[in-house]
Amino acid sequence: SERARRDVVRFVEPATGEVVARRPDMTPQIARIAATHFSSRALPLRLAYEGSVIRTPRGRTRRLRQIAQAGIELIGWSAVDADVEVILAALDALDALGLHGARVELSHAAIGRALVALAPAAQRDLFADALGARDVATLERIVGAGPALDRARAAVALAGPASVLDRAAEALADPNLQGP
């Protein structure tokens, strides 16, 4: 996507003069590794990784931030049980680190894309950030009152315990929120 290309950090390596690019996320590289190095392995693949990435913050400060990123990927298994396995692995890892009572947030990219498409093209990045932060005031400034704001508010309200999934099924019955 255009946003992903824009978020790549490029700099000149002083010793060689070569241009080096660092992405803000490791998932695309993990997908490439899985497709090339592990293509002959039986699915599903269970991969874990850690390393540092560089993020370009938005807003007033434009300083680059180098942060640690760790993750797991479960490739080639699309059942609900696969999602449960990944969530439980994440919770186990957090618990092992002493971070008890962690909260897991779930989202669906197609729903997010459908919601972001409701915003004017020039403000979609800001709308996506506001949606992720559940910032209803910014969402309203971008799209004003009306059906687009109502849909964004409905999505933002889908937060809470597992029982929220019942409310999600109801809210997503609206074909405009189901994505492509």
Image (spheres, helix red, strand yellow):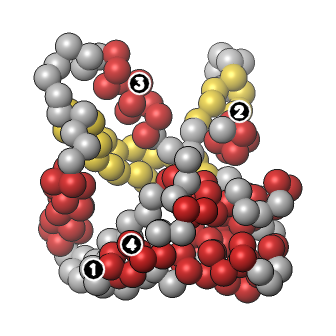
The residue wearing badge 1 is: 162
| Contact flag, marks 3 and 1 (Cβ < 8 Å) | no
| Contact flag, marks 1 and 4 (Cβ < 8 Å) | no
The residue wearing badge 4 is: 169
Which residue type does callout 1 highlight?
Answer: Ala
Q: Nearer the viewer, mark 4 or mark 2?
A: 4
Q: Nearer the viewer, mark 2 or mark 3?
A: 3
Q: Is residue 169 toward the left or the right of residue 5 in the image?
A: left
Q: Earlier in the sequence, mark 2 or mark 1?
A: 2
* Mark 2 crowdedness (10 Å alpha carbons): few <14, some 14-19, many ≥20: few
Q: Does dot 3 land on a helix, a strand or a loop?
A: helix
Q: Percent from the top left, x then y, of residue 82?
A: 19, 50
Q: Earlier in the sequence, mark 2 or mark 3?
A: 2
For the residue pair 58 and 128, the one nearer the viewer reads as: 128
Q: Is residue 42 above or below residue 167?
A: above
Give how far apart the Cα atoms at labels 2 and 3 are: 23 Å
Which residue type does callout 4 highlight?
Answer: Ala
Q: Earlier in the sequence, mark 1 or mark 4?
A: 1
The residue wearing badge 3 is: 32
Q: Does dot 4 land on a helix, a strand or a loop?
A: helix
Q: Earlier in the sequence, mark 3 or mark 1?
A: 3
| Contact flag, marks 2 and 3 (Cβ < 8 Å) | no
Q: Earlier in the sequence, mark 4 or mark 2?
A: 2
* Mark 1 crowdedness (10 Å alpha carbons): few <14, some 14-19, many ≥20: few
The residue wearing badge 2 is: 11
Give how far apart the Cα atoms at labels 4 and 2 are: 46 Å
Which residue type does callout 2 highlight?
Answer: Phe
Q: Is residue 177 toward the left or the right of residue 33 in the image?
A: right
